[in-house]
């Protein structure tokens, strides 16, 4: 009679968090480069949204104070959308590439964990957590940086007219929207690398010489 197959190990979420954080520390240089990519993309998105929300009203108020009335200008909107889309796509590719390289470097580690009984869902969770930690940190810094740069430039260009058109609710909406997009693209970029790691066969992983 064949021996009974032992149950796979259901490791707690805290263990996945611990391993994910340790992996980010070990690969600190790559983590920082990926973080910078996220920060730049989200900062650009936040900057564009904030500028487009405040600048037209500030410009109109400044010109109206000088007795000049201008019609709203919507030129350049499509080009801005394309620039934002491209920057977010580049960010997604950068995150996905970094996570794929992490998977390739950790063939033996993944194979060992699976041989010891780790579930596919645990491996999937592990790589998603790594990506989401980077995404959350990069998104927060990017939102803060984008808001700061846009407000400083608007203040320099329009002075009091800019400050009188800066509303807290608008900034909160922009920050929330940028944060949601940042986390969404991070999760989307991590899907394929995490799936690839989870579907890896333990024996094949242990044979790889990395």
Image (spheres, helix red, strand yellow):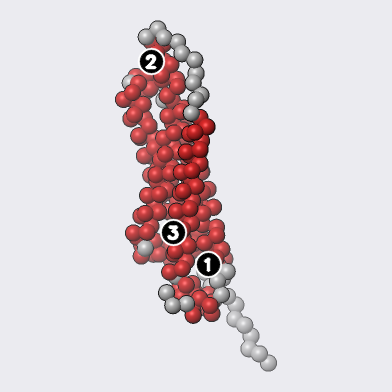
The quarter of the rendered structure image containing the C terminus is: bottom left
Earlier in the chain: of badge 3 and badge 2, it is 2
Q: Which mark is residue 85?
A: none
Q: Secondary structure at mark 1?
A: helix
Identify the residue at horizontal 37%, vertical 54% (top origin): 33
The residue sitting at the left extreme is 156
* Pointer 2 residue: 62
* Pointer 3 residue: 98
Identify the residue at horizontal 51%, vertical 38% (top origin): 82
The residue sitting at the bottom extreme is 1
Residue 173: image location, x then y, percent: 49, 34
Earlier in the chain: of badge 1 and badge 3, it is 3
The quarter of the rendered structure image containing the N terminus is: bottom right
Q: Is residue 80 above or below residue 30?
A: above
Nearest the viewer among 44 and 112 is 44
* Pointer 1 residue: 197
Residue 137: image location, x then y, percent: 41, 49
């Amino acid at each position: 009679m064949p021996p009974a197959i032992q149950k796979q190990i259901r490791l707690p979420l805290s263990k996945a968090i611990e391993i994910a954080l340790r992996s980010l520390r070990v690969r600190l240089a790559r983590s920082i480069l990926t973080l910078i990519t996220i920060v730049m993309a989200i900062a650009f998105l936040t900057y564009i949204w904030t500028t487009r929300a405040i600048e037209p009203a500030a410009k109109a108020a400044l010109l109206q104070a000088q007795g000049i009335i201008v019609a709203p200008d919507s030129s350049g909107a499509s080009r801005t959308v394309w620039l934002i889309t491209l920057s977010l796509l580049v960010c997604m590719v950068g995150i996905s590439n970094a996570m794929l390289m992490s998977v390739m470097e950790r063939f033996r580690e993944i194979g060992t964990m699976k041989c010891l009984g780790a579930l596919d869902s645990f491996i999937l969770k592990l790589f998603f957590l790594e990506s989401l930690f980077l995404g959350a940190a990069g998104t927060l810094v990017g939102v803060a940086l984008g808001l700061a740069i846009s407000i400083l430039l608007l203040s320099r260009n329009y002075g009091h007219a800019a400050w009188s058109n800066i509303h807290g609710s608008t900034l909160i909406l922009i920050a929330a929207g940028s944060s949601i997009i940042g986390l969404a693209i991070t999760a989307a970029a991590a899907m394929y690398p995490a799936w690839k790691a989870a579907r890896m066969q333990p024996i094949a992983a242990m044979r790889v010489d990395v």
